[in-house]
Image (cartoon, rainbow, N blue to C red):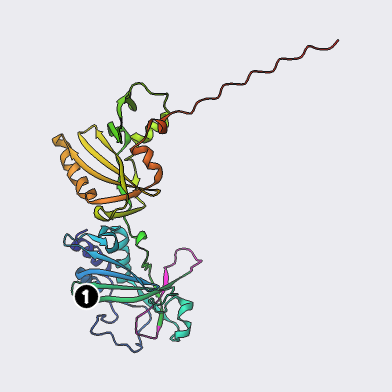
Amino acid sequence: MKPASLAGLIVAGALAIGGGWYFGSATTPTQQRAIDAGALMFPDLAPKLRDAARIEVVNKGKTTVLNRAASGQWGIADRGGYRLQDSKLRAMLTSLTELRLIEARTADAEQYARLGVEDAESANAGSNRLRVLNAAGQPIVDVIVGHRRVRTQGKVPEQVYVRRPGEAQTWLAEGNLQADADPQLWLDRDVVNIEHKRVSGVVSTRGSDVLIFGQEDGKLVLTSPTDHPRLEDYKVEDVARALESLTFQDVRPDADAPGEEIGQAVFTLTDGMTVAARVLRADKDIWVRFAVTATEDKAKPDAERLAQRLGGWSYQVGSWKEKAFVPTIEDLKAAEKPEPEPEPTAEPAKP
């Protein structure tokens, strides 16, 4: 996502909001501050978010860092800068621009934990501290996000408890602000989605064993080796669907990915695109790396976009995907039907 597009969406949603006080690192006193109920917590925030370059979410002393790359794409620092969910980021930043303080609550530090607004650096904290910083490391936003208030009525605004770090006063605020500290919740888990009907052939290599699949009558079949036992149709179809709605459990840069390569599969698509998948195993985990090329000019633009998206990353997928990418004949073989037991002969009737 480009910075201008992100800021533009936030500005559009916040232009009609006014009032309150200016928030910035140089003008935030540490003492308690009196305000009018209903005032924006961060007035005039939307334009400042154009300069956002780093976001930190602290929970129990651990910090999740989101960084903006030179391209404008936001990523997760401890995943090598892997892209995050744009919609989730937009929702969080837009919520900050719309957050309104509606009711002052406790200023007693002994009561902070009850609202979830204690210092997030504590090992037992239930709060999240959200900081939005510019490229120079100066804070644009700094707020402790506490528990969400449960609302039993329908169609009423969301509410959350908040506190400014260094201030005693806590507030009940109106807004749907969520600051997740778990990096797993930020990941964009979609890898690729190639419909099985587009797969015209697959070559799966595992050690010295090579399985070649081709299309016959609209479905994938094993064409080599020709001398093979009866195969289970749904297991062969899983090979065709290996790239369909594929998501990951974890992701790392190729240089940091664990495991050793156990095989590879090359998928040829009907439009001339080729997707090569290298499969690695680390203990019980299965990791996959992708390389995308195209032999037909019409497929090259899509292939280049997909190659740019997937290149340089290793994806941990479900362990069951091993048999879809690099199956063996034994993996695909149909179960043998047991022979029926002979029916017992009836005893002759006694006179």
Query: Measured from the top left, where is residue 54 in percent x and y?
Result: 24, 69
The quarter of the rendered structure image containing the C terminus is top right
Comparing 129 with 80, the one in front is 80
Query: Measured from the top left, where is residue 240 in percent x and y?
Result: 33, 34
Query: Measured from the top left, where is residue 122 in percent x and y?
Result: 41, 77
Comparing 343 with 328, the one in front is 328
Secondary structure of residue under mark 1: loop
Residue at position x 25%, y 85% in the image: 27
Query: Measured from the top left, where is residue 301 in percent x and y?
Result: 16, 42
Q: Main secondary structure of the magenta part?
A: loop
- From the viewer's perspective, is residue 52 above or below residue 170? above
Comparing 17 with 84, the one in front is 84
Work out which residue is located at the far bottom of the displayed protein and give it: 31
The segment highlighted magenta reads: 150-169
The residue identified by callout 1 is 137
Residue 226 figure quarter: top left
Does 68 sit left or right of 233 as displayed?
left
Residue 242 figure quarter: top left
